[in-house]
Image (cartoon, rainbow, N blue to C red):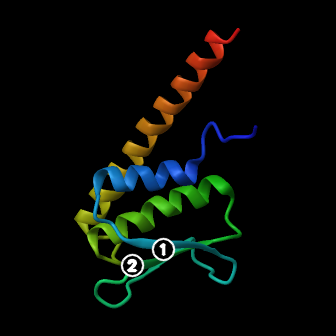
Amino acid sequence: MISFVYNPIDAMVKAATNLYPTINADIQFNPAIKAPGVTTFQREGEPALIDINAELPFDSAIESLAYELAHVATKTTSKNDPEWKEASERILNEFARIVDKRIEKYQKKTKQSR
């Protein structure tokens, strides 16, 4: 059996949905964009489209995903918007909490199996 102990993409999505349960987005890794990430708002009622630059280092892509999820949560494209800044910080903090909890749970599990 193979499983991820820690999947940062899923953890970042979980962080955003924990804080913003009605968030609605489709996410894709896109080698054609030059920016780290781009959020495109579709017609009303349709999910926003988040593009993450597929050529970014993995850790940078995860951080860009947080920022783009914050855009969707606040329905803004401006990085100067105070709501966006707060949402970004909240999502990153929730992500860190989730990761710490998952790693702690895994470490506890592996110690018990020894």
What kind of residue is marked 1? Answer: Asp
Q: Give the residue displayed 48% in from the left and 74% down from the top.
A: 26
Image vertical order of residue 113 relative to residue 33, above or below: above
Query: Which quadrant of the view contains residue 1?
Result: top right
- Judge from the rendering whether residue 100 lies leftward or rightward of residue 72; answer left or right: right
Q: Give the residue displayed 38% in from the left and 43% down from the top.
A: 93
Which numbered dot is residue 45? none
Q: Which residue is mark 2?
A: 47
- Looking at the picture, how far across and down is residue 28, in whole percent? 58, 73
State the residue in front, 68 or 15.
Answer: 15
Callout 2 crowding tier (Cα within 10 Å): few <14, some 14–19, many ≥20? some
Q: Give the residue displayed 69% in from the left and 78% down from the top.
A: 31
Mark 2 in CB contact with mark 1 (< 8 angstroms): yes
Q: Which residue is mark 1?
A: 26
- Looking at the picture, how far across and down is residue 92, in whole percent? 41, 49
State the residue in front, 22 or 75.
Answer: 22
Image vertical order of residue 46 relative to residue 86, above or below: below
Residue farthest to the left, as pictured:
83
Query: Which quadrant of the view contains residue 76?
Result: bottom left
What kind of residue is marked 2? Answer: Pro
Image vertical order of residue 111 relative to residue 87, above or below: above
State the residue in front, 73 or 55.
Answer: 73
- Judge from the rendering whether residue 82 lies leftward or rightward of residue 66; answer left or right: left
Secondary structure found at label 2 = loop
